[in-house]
Image (spheres, rainbow, N blue to C red):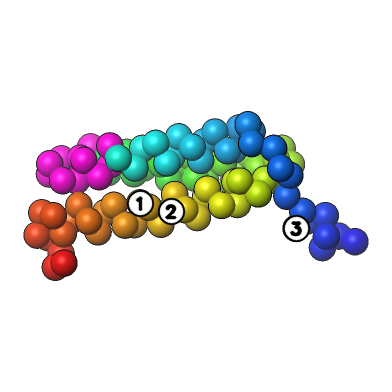
Amino acid sequence: MAGESAGAAESRIWTIPNLLSMLRLALVPPFLMLIVVGDYVAALVVLVVASFTDLLDGYLARRLHQVTRLGQLLDPAADRLYIFAALVGLAANELVPW
């Protein structure tokens, strides 16, 4: 059935979309550090690059038929880590309350 094949995910790890998700995860610590030190322009550049990799990995996963279970876990985890890092960094600078 079409629903089963659309929802099926591969078990491969080393795919281009997964590598992009891993890159996005690797950019979380620099993003947080840039916010903490108050370099908001550089933090924004890192966030834009991370957002582009998010867009690109989703597009490539579907286009290249490389949707994997790991990618389904990494993608939302990375998104939530960026939100968490932004809140922690802004709270550390007392721009938002703890």
- Expressed as whole percent of the image width and height from the top left, the position of residue 25 reads 42, 41
Q: Give the residue at x 61% y 46%.
A: 70
Q: Residue furthest bottom?
A: 97
Label 2 neighbourhood size at 10 Å, few (<14), some (14-19), many (20+)?
A: some
Q: Quadrant of the N terminus?
A: bottom right
Name which of mark 3 and mark 1 comes first in the sequence.
Answer: 3
Indicate the secondary structure of the residue bearing disc 2: helix
Mark pair 2, 3: CA separation:
21 Å
| Main SS, magenta residues | helix
- Expressed as whole percent of the image width and height from the top left, the position of residue 89 reads 20, 52
Horizontal relation, residue 31 to residue 18: left or right: left
- Expressed as whole percent of the image width and height from the top left, the position of residue 13 reads 64, 36
Q: Give the residue at x 69% y 37%.
A: 12
Q: Is residue 80 positioned above or below 24 on the image?
A: below
Q: In the image, what residue type sits under mark 2? A: Asp
Residue 92 magenta: no
Q: Give the residue at x 54% y 33%.
A: 19
Label 3 neighbourhood size at 10 Å, few (<14), some (14-19), many (20+)?
A: few
Q: In the image, what residue type sits under mark 1? A: Tyr
Q: Name which quarter of the figure residue 51 lies in.
A: top left
Residue 33 magenta: yes
Indicate the secondary structure of the residue bearing disc 3: helix
Magenta residues, as a range? 30-42
- Tags 1 and 2 in contact by the CB under 8 Å rule? yes
- Residue at image mark 3: 7
- Residue at image mark 1: 82
Q: In the image, what residue type sits under mark 3? A: Gly
Horizontal relation, residue 87 to residue 51: left or right: left
- Residue at image mark 2: 79
- Expressed as whole percent of the image width and height from the top left, the position of residue 56 reads 55, 40
Q: Give the residue at x 18% y 56%.
A: 90
